């Protein structure tokens, strides 16, 4: 049992001679040789088992955090949209109030009942527009508060996930530092024995 490195012609001749000599070798010697050649691989497997599922856990946490960041961005964008909607409704209220003032001036110069009824209906319509815009503003403010609460909860969860990720990464780094040199050395030895 053994291995050799050298000139291809000489190694070929040595292989032929060794095959005659090693034929029918004592069984414990064959078992010991096989165990020696495979021992590096089993040690490498043990090293990888020490790491376990940690690399996958780290990757999953990173993906979760990225998803939570996306969700936070979407919620923030929704808040901005709600703010714009509130501004639009405030503008509607302002325009309606301007029209009501304009109609009040027109009422002073009314010439007949038909014109009076028309102006009163326009004032009533603008009052309804104001009420509708105020209702929308109240609803939007409720939605804003709900979104802010959701963002707050999501930020807390995100902080927990980030802390967990930091802990897992440091744990993985420690294990990698401890085992990487040994694994590289054993892989190199294993490749030597296989060739």
Image: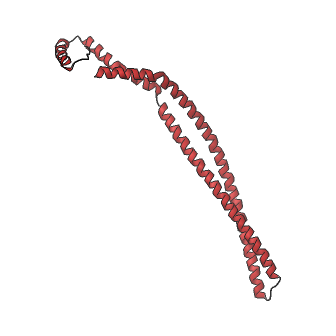
Residue located 30% across and 13% down the image: 32
Judge from the rendering whether residue 4 lies leftward or rightward of residue 49; answer left or right: left
Judge from the rendering whether residue 121 lies leftward or rightward of residue 32; answer left or right: right
Residue 165 drawn at (x, y percent): 56, 34
Residue 113 drawn at (x, y percent): 78, 87
Residue located 40% across and 23% down the image: 184
**Colouring:** secondary structure
Q: How many marks?
A: 0
- Work out which residue is located at the far front of the displayed protein and give it: 7
- Work out which residue is located at the far bottom of the displayed protein and give it: 112
User: Which quadrant is home to the N terminus?
Assistant: top left
Q: Can residue 160 be seen in this view?
A: yes
Which quadrant of the structure image shows residue 67? top right
Residue located 71% across and 70% down the image: 129
Q: Is residue 42 visible?
A: no
Residue 140 drawn at (x, y percent): 68, 59
Residue 8 drawn at (x, y percent): 20, 20
User: Which quadrant is home to the C terminus?
Assistant: top left
């Amino acid at each position: 049992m053994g291995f050799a490195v050298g000139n291809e012609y000489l190694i070929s001749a040595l292989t032929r001679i060794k095959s005659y000599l090693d034929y029918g070798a004592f069984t414990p010697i064959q078992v010991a040789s096989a165990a020696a050649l495979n021992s590096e691989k089993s040690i490498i497997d043990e090293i990888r088992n020490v790491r376990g599922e940690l690399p996958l856990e780290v990757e999953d946490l990173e993906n979760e955090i990225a998803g939570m960041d996306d969700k936070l961005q979407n919620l923030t964008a929704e808040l901005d949209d709600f703010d714009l909607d509130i501004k639009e409704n405030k503008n509607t209220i302002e325009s309606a109030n301007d029209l009501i003032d304009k109609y009040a001036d027109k009422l002073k110069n009314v010439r007949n009942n038909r014109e009076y009824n028309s102006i009163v209906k326009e004032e009533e319509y603008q009052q309804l527009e104001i009420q509708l815009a105020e209702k929308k503003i109240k609803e939007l403010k409720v939605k804003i508060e709900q979104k802010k609460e959701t963002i707050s909860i999501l930020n807390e969860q995100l902080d927990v996930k980030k802390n967990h990720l930091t802990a897992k990464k440091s744990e993985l780094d420690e294990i990698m530092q401890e085992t990487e040199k040994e694994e590289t050395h054993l892989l190199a030895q294993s490749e030597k024995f296989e060739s």
